[in-house]
Image: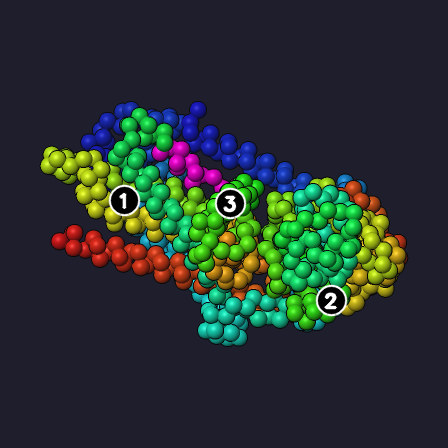
Amino acid sequence: MPPEAAPKLQHLEETRRPPEDPIVNADSGAASAELGLVAAAGDAAAVASGDLAEPAELGGRVKLPQAARGRIFELAVYGATGAFIAIVAGLFIELLTNSWPSISTFGLSFLWTSQWNPVTDQFGALPFIYGTIVSSAIAILLASISGVMAGAFLAEFSPIRLAEPLSFVIELLAAVPSVVYGLWGLFVLGPVMRDSVEPVLQRYFGFLPIFSGTIYGVGMLTAGVILAIMIVPTVTAISRDVMRAVPDSQREAIWALGATRWQGFKMVVLPIARPGIFAACILALGRALGETIATTMVIGNRPAIAASLFAPGYTISSVIANEFTEATTQVYLSALIELGLLLFVISVIVNGLARLLLWTIFRPMES
Amino acid sequence: MSLWSWRSKAAGLVGVVLALGTSVALAATQLTGAGSTLDYPFFSKAFYQYSQQHADVTVNYQSIGSGGGIQQFIAKTVDFGATDVPMNAQELKLANAPVLQVPVTLGAAAIGYNIPGVGKGLRMTRQLIADIYLGNIKKWNAPELVKLNPNLKLPDMDITVVHRSDGSGTTYIFTDFLSHVSAQWKEKVGTGKSVQWPAGIGGKGNEGVAGQVRQTPGAIGYIELAYVLENQMTYAQVENKAGQYLYPSIETVAAAAASKPEVSSTDFSIVDAVGASSYPISGYSWVMLYEHPSDPARATLVRDTMEWLVTKGQAVAKSVDYVPLPENVQQRALKIISQMKV
């Protein structure tokens, strides 16, 4: 029984409030218990168990006992969690079931075949796995370096008045829809890469196979750059927060020993913040692996593995988005679904490894 | 005023609005269709006009792609399906009931290009297009191209081939054409809504290909005719079977269709058609209907809508830069629809 209800019994018998009183209705918990008390004219036992229903003239709402309310809340919380687990498990099972025709036709060789021929129904996932991994690798390489540096600037080196607006602007990058990035990439970044960046790279580093070959403007490198721009806000924001969380006492200690700001940052803040920065990069990588529309507009959509980064490529999410609606044969559809299953598995592995790594880093810290 | 009665008043108002809304909608029967994206601009305008003229029918068309259209049609969740390539024997077996396939509109692939210093007026032979897409011809100043276009200054520039990355009816028409004119293409690649392209980069949708072509000097790509006309792009004259160099247009595509009036779902290819004014890269788009529909009242409405679509509805096609069916094909379509047992 709510402790505050008993003393109020006496008070309410004199001052019975009408049901339309907004103050009563706003303070629903205790107040409706009070009205219930008034209606029953002080039946203490009924009040104690809270099993009182209000009479019709007060609206007739049934109030449940506190224990029951607690149980319902517990059920709801467990239920919501269970529902999410069931959805993920169901997703995996559904993907597995629907890709079975392809799995049984191609077996494990699906993973290392380079063919993608819808006319003869010969499918292989290798170019897509390669494209997904390479474009995400370029993205995380570019984004982690620039994102951590931006986060460090915002956390350590920038004037305080500048830090907030700059953080806001960088986080705005995350709010831009993916398809807008794709359009910008096709019409702005593509020509810039084709006319300025890639020719320069080819002139000075053209002896490397990754910078050789025909320059189209669209291709693996452009897709990597766009993905990097899309995931930089995540890396920056989390790095900044993690670095800010390093206690000032640590910084002051090393400054007191005569270190410069940069030395303090390198020797104290960065090592402490490293697990968090790593987690930020993994989170960003997860986004880059699954990014569909922006990638498909700038990657060139060619299911071929080429040594050059200037060459067009293809990612798993792009091919699914492109070909799913028009795939008519059973094998074709299930090959696409099997690609989806592969992406699911790759994402789970990447995230799982990251969590495992973080767990091993944090375990010794707890003891 | 108490919070509770405000809430109940608001709920009541929402309920009344919903009831009014549904009652208005319920007055007209809503027919549903799904499928080809190629048809969508034409269908959306045509069905809207039909609903204006016939208050008892509205048509809800979902352009989810031909594959999706066939699946929904087989699952009987829609009244009619639309596809760029008629259902083949395997799909008809899945449908497990006789299916009527009606030609409803025409599509064509225009060859757009972006060559610095060269405007309108590029000529291509059929074999040349095949060679470019096979990767056999790699530069714009190749001797075959120069010989064909003596009055154009073709630069020493790589040809960037652009194709569709998504499955599409336009790709089907284009690869069907290439298979007809080049034995090497037929053997190496074949015909399909999606194929394994020997060369080039893929753009998503007509917009993707057009965007790539516009952005990339030295690019060539095949784009749906309606899109090319609406966006005033530069496209090439293509040689047809009779040796004439033609621009794709409503007239030349209709001429290609008129040259084969006995079109059917098993014999539907009109690429490389005979006739002096036939554009060689043309094709139909189809609507699928069940021969023995289960709901007679609904089926009557569907039949009437389709009969309108292939006759009077064709006038709408021109306004969205789609090619109307020629007279003889309209009669053929009507004959197929009349087989509906309703």
Of mark 1 and mark 3, the one earlier in the sequence is 1
How far across and down, in percent of the image, does residue A132 sit?
45, 57
Which residue appears at 27% of the width and 35% of the height? Answer: A155
Left/right of residue A112 with respect to residue A58 in the rendered view: right
The answer for how far apart the CA atoms under marks 2 and 3 are is 36 Å
In the rendered image, is residue B271 in sight?
yes
Q: For the residue labelled by badge 3, is the local secondary structure a helix, a strand or a loop?
A: helix
User: What is the quadrant of the N terminus of chain B in the image?
Assistant: top left
Circle 2 or circle 1, nearest the eye:
2
**What is the chain identity of the residue bearing mark 1?**
A
Range of residues picked out in magenta: A167-182
**Residue beneath label 2, please?**
B182
**Residue beneath label 3, please?**
A193
In the rendered image, is residue B296 in sight?
no
- Decide whether residue A216 is among the magenta residues: no
How far across and down, in percent of the image, does residue B265 sit?
77, 65
Of residues B108 and A6, which is closer to you in this image?
A: B108
State whether residue A18 is above or below residue B152.
Answer: above
**Residue beneath label 1, please?**
A66
Circle 1 or circle 3, nearest the eye:
3
